[in-house]
Image (tube, rainbow, N blue to C red):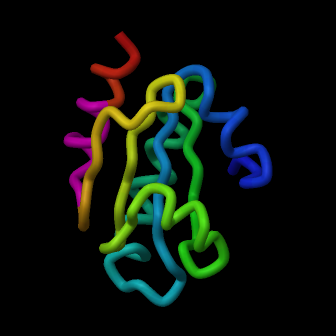
């Protein structure tokens, strides 16, 4: 997991998937295994960052997070897609593959 103090520099190049969630959120917990598999599957090609919205309020506000789980796909620091709620691994993988090409 990437340190959040370096969020801008880490997401400035390449593709990143940012998982905005909270430990008390049931759907977020349900999505955790999917995120872990994607982190493993795309190791070295996609940066996966988990953001606890309770601890990182400024970052959550910057991305206008209103509902969790919320996954934001970034390409060179710019948002290219947003997923709200539970997502299938295949759906996320398809978007990651597209962003990588």
Q: Is residue 86 magenta?
A: no
Q: Is residue 89 magenta?
A: yes
Residue at the top extreme? 101
Q: Residue at x 51, y 53 (%)?
A: 36
Q: Main secondary structure of the magenta part?
A: helix
- Residue 12 image point, x, y percent: 62, 27
Quarter-wise, where is residue 7 in the image?
A: top right
Quarter-wise, where is residue 78 in the image?
A: top left
Q: Nearer the viewer, residue 79 or 31?
A: 79
Q: Residue at x 44, y 35 (%)?
A: 74
The magenta span reads 87-95
Up-down: is 37 above or below 85? above
- Residue 73 image point, x, y percent: 39, 39
Up-down: is 18 above or below 77? below
Image label count: 0
Quarter-wise, where is residue 32 in the image?
A: bottom left
Rendered-image quadrant of the C terminus: top left
Residue at the bottom extreme? 24
Q: Quick check: 87 left or right of 101?
A: left
Q: Residue at x 59, y 30 (%)?
A: 43
- Residue 37 image point, x, y percent: 46, 47
Q: Residue at x 22, y 41 (%)?
A: 90
Up-down: is 43 above or below 17? above
- Residue 62 image point, x, y percent: 50, 58
Q: Quick check: 4 left or right of 86?
A: right
């Amino acid at each position: 997991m990437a340190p959040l103090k370096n969020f801008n520099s880490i997401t400035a190049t390449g593709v990143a998937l940012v998982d905005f969630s909270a430990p008390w959120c049931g759907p977020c917990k349900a999505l955790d295994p999917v995120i872990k598999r994607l982190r493993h599957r795309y190791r070295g090609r996609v940066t996966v960052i988990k953001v606890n919205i309770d601890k990182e309020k400024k970052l959550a506000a910057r991305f206008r997070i209103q509902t969790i789980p919320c996954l934001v796909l970034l390409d060179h620091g710019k948002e290219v897609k947003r997923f709200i709620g539970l997502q299938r691994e295949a759906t996320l993988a398809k978007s990651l593959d597209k962003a990588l090409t």
